[in-house]
Image (cartoon, rainbow, N blue to C red):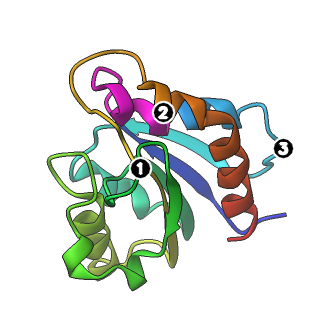
Protein backbone atom coordinates (compact mmCIF):
# COMPACT_ATOMS: atom_id res chain seq x y z
CA UNK A 1 0.00 0.00 0.00
CA UNK A 2 1.22 3.51 -0.79
CA UNK A 3 0.08 7.08 -0.46
CA UNK A 4 1.63 7.89 -3.84
CA UNK A 5 -0.99 9.19 -6.30
CA UNK A 6 1.20 9.27 -9.39
CA UNK A 7 4.60 8.61 -10.88
CA UNK A 8 5.47 11.29 -13.42
CA UNK A 9 8.23 10.55 -15.92
CA UNK A 10 10.15 13.34 -17.61
CA UNK A 11 12.52 12.93 -20.52
CA UNK A 12 13.13 13.33 -24.22
CA UNK A 13 13.23 10.00 -26.10
CA UNK A 14 15.62 11.50 -28.67
CA UNK A 15 18.29 12.56 -26.14
CA UNK A 16 19.93 9.28 -25.05
CA UNK A 17 19.95 9.03 -21.23
CA UNK A 18 17.36 11.79 -20.93
CA UNK A 19 14.83 9.08 -21.85
CA UNK A 20 15.54 7.07 -18.68
CA UNK A 21 12.44 8.48 -16.92
CA UNK A 22 9.93 7.21 -19.50
CA UNK A 23 11.85 3.91 -19.79
CA UNK A 24 11.60 3.32 -16.04
CA UNK A 25 7.93 4.29 -16.12
CA UNK A 26 7.30 1.60 -18.77
CA UNK A 27 8.98 -0.98 -16.53
CA UNK A 28 6.57 -0.05 -13.70
CA UNK A 29 3.56 -1.17 -15.75
CA UNK A 30 4.36 -4.80 -14.85
CA UNK A 31 4.54 -4.06 -11.11
CA UNK A 32 1.80 -4.23 -8.49
CA UNK A 33 1.08 -0.55 -7.91
CA UNK A 34 -2.70 -0.25 -7.52
CA UNK A 35 -4.11 3.27 -7.44
CA UNK A 36 -0.83 4.81 -8.68
CA UNK A 37 -1.28 6.68 -11.95
CA UNK A 38 1.67 6.41 -14.36
CA UNK A 39 2.12 9.65 -16.34
CA UNK A 40 4.66 10.23 -19.13
CA UNK A 41 5.07 13.99 -19.65
CA UNK A 42 8.11 13.87 -21.92
CA UNK A 43 9.81 17.29 -21.77
CA UNK A 44 6.96 19.25 -20.17
CA UNK A 45 8.40 22.65 -19.25
CA UNK A 46 5.91 24.64 -17.22
CA UNK A 47 3.12 22.13 -18.00
CA UNK A 48 4.53 20.09 -15.10
CA UNK A 49 3.26 22.72 -12.65
CA UNK A 50 -0.32 22.31 -13.93
CA UNK A 51 -0.17 18.51 -13.83
CA UNK A 52 1.26 18.46 -10.29
CA UNK A 53 -1.84 20.29 -9.07
CA UNK A 54 -3.90 17.16 -9.79
CA UNK A 55 -2.09 15.09 -7.14
CA UNK A 56 -1.28 15.21 -3.44
CA UNK A 57 1.72 12.86 -3.49
CA UNK A 58 4.00 12.15 -6.46
CA UNK A 59 7.32 10.66 -7.48
CA UNK A 60 8.98 12.33 -10.47
CA UNK A 61 11.40 10.15 -12.46
CA UNK A 62 14.03 11.98 -14.47
CA UNK A 63 17.63 12.08 -15.66
CA UNK A 64 19.27 14.31 -13.05
CA UNK A 65 22.85 15.54 -13.18
CA UNK A 66 24.03 15.44 -9.57
CA UNK A 67 27.70 14.89 -10.30
CA UNK A 68 27.80 11.12 -9.74
CA UNK A 69 28.96 8.27 -11.96
CA UNK A 70 26.59 7.63 -14.90
CA UNK A 71 23.85 5.20 -13.90
CA UNK A 72 23.88 6.19 -10.23
CA UNK A 73 20.35 6.72 -8.94
CA UNK A 74 19.13 8.62 -5.90
CA UNK A 75 15.86 9.79 -4.36
CA UNK A 76 15.72 13.52 -3.64
CA UNK A 77 13.34 15.45 -1.42
CA UNK A 78 13.04 18.84 -3.15
CA UNK A 79 12.42 20.47 0.23
CA UNK A 80 15.94 19.41 1.26
CA UNK A 81 17.65 20.32 -2.03
CA UNK A 82 20.14 23.15 -1.67
CA UNK A 83 20.19 25.88 -4.34
CA UNK A 84 23.84 25.03 -5.11
CA UNK A 85 22.62 21.72 -6.52
CA UNK A 86 19.85 23.30 -8.62
CA UNK A 87 21.39 22.56 -12.02
CA UNK A 88 20.46 18.92 -11.80
CA UNK A 89 17.64 18.61 -14.31
CA UNK A 90 18.56 17.77 -17.89
CA UNK A 91 15.81 19.94 -19.35
CA UNK A 92 15.84 23.62 -20.29
CA UNK A 93 13.60 24.32 -17.31
CA UNK A 94 15.08 22.63 -14.25
CA UNK A 95 12.71 20.23 -12.48
CA UNK A 96 13.76 21.53 -9.06
CA UNK A 97 12.94 25.12 -10.05
CA UNK A 98 9.54 24.00 -11.34
CA UNK A 99 8.87 22.23 -8.04
CA UNK A 100 9.58 25.48 -6.17
CA UNK A 101 6.97 27.24 -8.33
CA UNK A 102 4.50 24.36 -7.88
CA UNK A 103 4.95 24.56 -4.12
CA UNK A 104 4.25 28.30 -4.22
CA UNK A 105 0.98 27.70 -6.10
CA UNK A 106 -0.10 24.82 -3.87
CA UNK A 107 1.20 21.81 -5.72
CA UNK A 108 1.35 18.32 -4.19
CA UNK A 109 1.96 17.93 -0.47
CA UNK A 110 4.65 15.30 -0.97
CA UNK A 111 7.10 15.15 -3.88
CA UNK A 112 10.15 12.99 -4.38
CA UNK A 113 12.46 13.07 -7.38
CA UNK A 114 13.95 9.74 -8.43
CA UNK A 115 17.00 10.87 -10.37
CA UNK A 116 19.33 8.81 -12.53
CA UNK A 117 22.72 10.33 -13.36
CA UNK A 118 22.97 10.51 -17.16
CA UNK A 119 26.13 9.63 -19.05
CA UNK A 120 25.09 11.53 -22.18
CA UNK A 121 22.09 13.56 -23.27
CA UNK A 122 23.35 13.98 -26.83
CA UNK A 123 20.96 13.23 -29.66
CA UNK A 124 20.29 9.51 -30.00
CA UNK A 125 17.57 6.99 -29.24
CA UNK A 126 19.48 4.55 -27.01
CA UNK A 127 20.67 4.75 -23.43
CA UNK A 128 24.38 4.68 -22.69
CA UNK A 129 25.63 1.28 -21.52
CA UNK A 130 26.07 2.55 -17.95
CA UNK A 131 22.47 3.74 -17.64
CA UNK A 132 20.97 0.76 -19.50
CA UNK A 133 22.76 -1.60 -17.10
CA UNK A 134 21.03 -0.11 -14.04
CA UNK A 135 17.45 -0.32 -15.34
CA UNK A 136 16.60 -3.50 -13.34
CA UNK A 137 17.98 -2.33 -9.95
CA UNK A 138 16.73 1.23 -10.56
CA UNK A 139 13.24 -0.13 -11.22
CA UNK A 140 13.32 -2.04 -7.93
CA UNK A 141 14.56 1.05 -6.07
CA UNK A 142 11.86 3.17 -7.73
CA UNK A 143 9.15 0.75 -6.62
CA UNK A 144 10.52 0.94 -3.07
CA UNK A 145 10.52 4.76 -3.23
CA UNK A 146 6.88 4.72 -4.38
CA UNK A 147 5.81 2.30 -1.66
CA UNK A 148 7.62 4.25 1.07
CA UNK A 149 5.97 7.56 0.20
Residue at image location 66% in from the left, 31% down from the top: 27
* Callout 3 touching callout 1 (CB < 8 Å): no
Which of the two labelled residues, at mark 3 and mark 1, occupies the earlier sequence position? Answer: 3
Q: Which residue is the site of mark 3?
A: 32
Q: Percent position (x, y) of residue 98?
A: 25, 64
Please state the total of marks drawn on the protein image.
3
Magenta part of the chain: 12-22
Which of the two labelled residues, at mark 1 and mark 2, occupies the earlier sequence position? Answer: 1
Instruction: Say which element carries label 1.
Output: loop
Q: Give the camera-side residue of 44 and 144.
A: 144
Q: Is residue 131 magenta?
A: no
* Callout 1 touching callout 2 (CB < 8 Å): yes
Left or right: where 133 falls relative to 130: right
Dominant secondary structure (helix, strand or loop) of the stretch shown in magenta: helix
Q: Which residue is the site of mark 1?
A: 69
Q: Is residue 14 magenta?
A: yes
Q: Give the camera-side residue of 16 and 108.
A: 16
- Residues at marks 2 and 3, CA–CA distance in whole angstroms: 27 Å
Q: Which residue is the site of mark 2?
A: 130
Which of the two labelled residues, at mark 2 and mark 3, occupies the earlier sequence position? Answer: 3
Left or right: where 132 falls relative to 101: right
Say which mark, if any, is on residue 136: none
Amino acid sequence: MTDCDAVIALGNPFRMDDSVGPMLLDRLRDRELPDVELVDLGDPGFRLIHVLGDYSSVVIVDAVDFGAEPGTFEVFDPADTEPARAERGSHRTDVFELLEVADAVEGPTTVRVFGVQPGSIDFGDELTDEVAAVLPPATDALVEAIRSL
